Amino acid sequence: MKISAPLFATLFTTLIACATLPALAAENAADTATVVPAETAAPNRYLERARKLTIHALALIGVNYKWGSDSPEQGLDCSGLVSHVFQQVAGIVLPRNSQGMSNVGDKIDKAELQPGDLVFFNTRRRPYSHVGIYIGDARFVHSPRRGREVEVSDMQGRYWKQRYNGARRVGL
């Protein structure tokens, strides 16, 4: 799979930023002691897990599509990719198909999407027949179809924009 130079630059910059944030936070923490209020600890935990989900999903780019599989070694279908990432990173067992996943977590508006959210599409003439993991900037990681590989797609593209069904936020 070929990745365009602008997309590669965006992904690379995002990965570097995500990887360096904990180190920068640790340096700053050594300089000043702060107490984190309990109400901000949960959002920070969510953002950290969402960051890990996104990085793990991006690491699977290039894995072949295989219907019914949730193993990177054998290949992944769309729900297999999502199930694998959530199980490995957060220990969350999701339903095995996109339809079942569409009932998990909280329904959220498209304008409120955050990395780690599940995004759903109608790709088989039935709602919620395809799922991916939102990574930010109107992009998502997914395993599209037979003959393809795990990839990043733009939700603003005509195909995905017309087929968007909604999004869910799973409690991390």
Image (cartoon, helix red, strand yellow):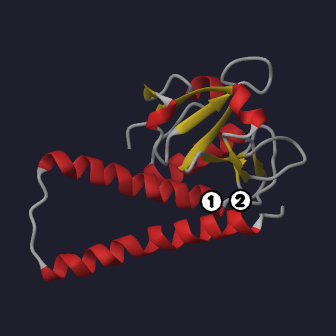
**Residue under the image location 73 percent in, 40 percent down:** 157
Where residue 24 sits in the image (x, y, percent)?
Answer: 32, 77
- The span from disc 2 to disc 1 (Cα, nearest Å) is 5 Å
Tag shown at residue 102? none
User: Residue 46 at what x, y percent from top left?
Assistant: 35, 49
Q: Residue placed at 73% from the left, 27% from the top?
A: 162
Disc 2 packing (10 Å; few <14; some 14–19; many ≥20): some
> In terms of secondary structure, where does tag 1 sit?
helix
The circle on residue 58 is 1
Q: Position of residue 87 (x, y in %)?
A: 52, 47
- Please tell me whether residue 3 is drawn above or below residue 160 in the rendered image: below
Where residue 160 sits, quadrant-wise, is: top right
Badge 2 vs badge 1, beta-carbon distance below 8 Å: yes
Q: Can you identify the residue that label 2 sits on?
A: 61
Residue 108 visible somewhere in the drawing: yes
Amino acid at the residue labelled 1: Leu
Q: Quadrant of residue 78?
A: top right
Q: In the current view of this chain or complex, which residue is farthest to the right?
A: 147
Foreground residue, 45 or 139? 139
Quarter of the image for the N terminus: give it: bottom right
